[in-house]
Amino acid sequence: MKDKAWIRGEVSICLPKYSAIYFILALSVLILVLHNMEVLEHEVNSSTNSTIIAPRASTVPKTHHSLWTFQSLSPEDAQEERLLLESITWPETPVLPTPLSLEKTTDPAHSNFIILPPQRGGGQWHVGDQLEVMINMYDFKGHPKKSGGDFLIARLHNLTLGAGVAGHVVDHLNGSYSAVFTLLWEGSAQVQVVLVHSSEAVTVLRRLNREQPDRIYSKSIFRSGSVSETTICNVYLRPTQQPLCNYTDLHTGEPWFCYKPRKLSCDARIIHYVGAFKENLKAKEEKLFQSGVNMKVSIRASGPANVTVLPKKEGQPEVENSNMTSGLSGYYYQGLWRGLGGTTVRQFNPPAISQCLKGKVVHLYGDSTTRQFFEYLTAVLPGLKAFDLHSSRKAGPFMALDNANNILVTFRFHGLPIVSVEKVFTSELRYIANELDGLKGGTDTVVVFGVWAHFACFPMEVYIHRLQSIRRAVVRLLDRAPGTLVIIRTGNLRAMSRTAAQMYSDWYSLQRVKVLRAMFKGLNVHLVDAWEMTLAHHLPHNIHPLPPIVKNMVNVILSYICPQQGP
């Protein structure tokens, strides 16, 4: 006891004498540690280019949550949302009778199209002219439809020439439609018109996103020691007596909720994966989604389906300037994508790709369709070696390095919602806006992102909110580093079954393509128009476009990075 008392007495005696020295030493050590942490954080952010915002989850009381939960929108964001929703308003579609019968619904087998004669040129078509097709829709009884709202796509193509271009479809709201094409090559050009969905099917798709936004739900695994629980999670969760875990991102305001585990805390969440799809079609509505019957079916021509195109007339503008009048992004010729009214699309072999990307950092963000660019580059460039980050096989993150050419390529998924069956650690889930805010940027930095497929089954407001947060981050990035190159990939057409149509219909994707184009118009960004590039190509539609299309998309990206010099 005396020894302990003596020690306490010595400390009490010595502290006044050396307290100033101890304080200065402690303060110096603290400053040094903080400085090293700042340096380390800067180095980590420089190498991984990411900002992690991981707030502690909060518990939402039982009676304080609903299906629609967003942070309050600013007046500007709310007005933009309203204008965007108005801009993509689809024509009125019919109210479906009960019970449903196909007899009065759109039937592609009874429908037809006819090529209208040229308005000038003595009955001949020339490169640069507009070709117009009139489409007339009929029901299964062979009666003309009297209203619009059918979802039609059209393209002009020549398989021998490897040529193809998308058409613009106009709904006359009376059962008839026009498809307009710009003639861009000499020789034969064949018209193809496809009914993607009848107006009656569009009625169902509208109702599903309005009434059943939670028809695809995810799950999370919570774990602490030997205790493990699994609950349902989503952007929206229906009110129950069960409290919620609120994982809304503090920076972007992106909502995400899980039902709280019974035993574990909200902070014990470690794994995300897709739960299930709840089919919510009413009686006999499945008949509206039959492949080969009334979904993605070609419509026959009443008369010739092709025309012969002559060389352009003297004085007509070059086809490269057709974007000014047609609004097209480009077209295929000899299997290669040719841009209109913008950057000339160059062709890059592996050595040219390495030379173009030399000294560059390329960050890819988005879904599996953006991941295709990472897979393409690592497959064709022998010097670009992927690191094994022991991450999710599909969701990533991924990283590849070409040390000799100082090329770094990364891929990271766009953050929740992720409709994937593969289990992903929640610690790897990042929102694109947060990632962009962690980038230094500059002339050696390329950002490519695509956000669309996993948002198809949610109301459009969810998608608009996500793009608003990404756009703000893009603006901040370009403000602090104007030399940064930002490229955006649009959504594309895909194959559809009855189930896939309810979740990921091309009709949903088209609305999101329109919104994305509108929201980034006027910014110093570039587009890879995957919608047109899949519509114009002869290959079958696929959620993951086939290799020839991906190669053309990569050439578009590389042409933005390394544009053609001189005339």
Image (cartoon, rainbow, N blue to C red):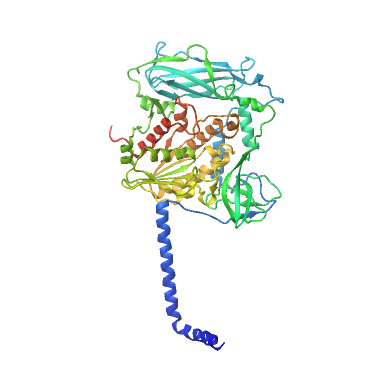
**As rendered, which of 563 and 234 lies closer to the eye?**
234
Relative to 362, does residue 346 appear above or below in the rendering? above
On-image quarter of the C terminus: top left
Residue 79: quadrant of the picture = top right
Outermost left residue: 566
Q: What is the x, y in percent for residue 238?
A: 67, 44
Q: Is residue 92 visible?
A: no
Q: Give the side of residue 235 with respect to residue 303, left or right.
A: right
Residue 521: quadrant of the picture = top left
Point 54% across, 37% down: residue: 84
Q: What is the x, y in percent for residue 203?
A: 63, 29
Q: Is residue 239 visible?
A: yes
**As rendered, which of 273 and 137 lies closer to the eye?**
273
Residue 487: quadrant of the picture = top left
Relative to 340, does residue 51 appear above or below in the rendering? below
Q: Give the side of residue 189 with respect to residue 504, left or right.
A: left
Q: What is the x, y in percent for residue 276?
A: 62, 40
**As rendered, which of 334 and 520 lies closer to the eye?**
334
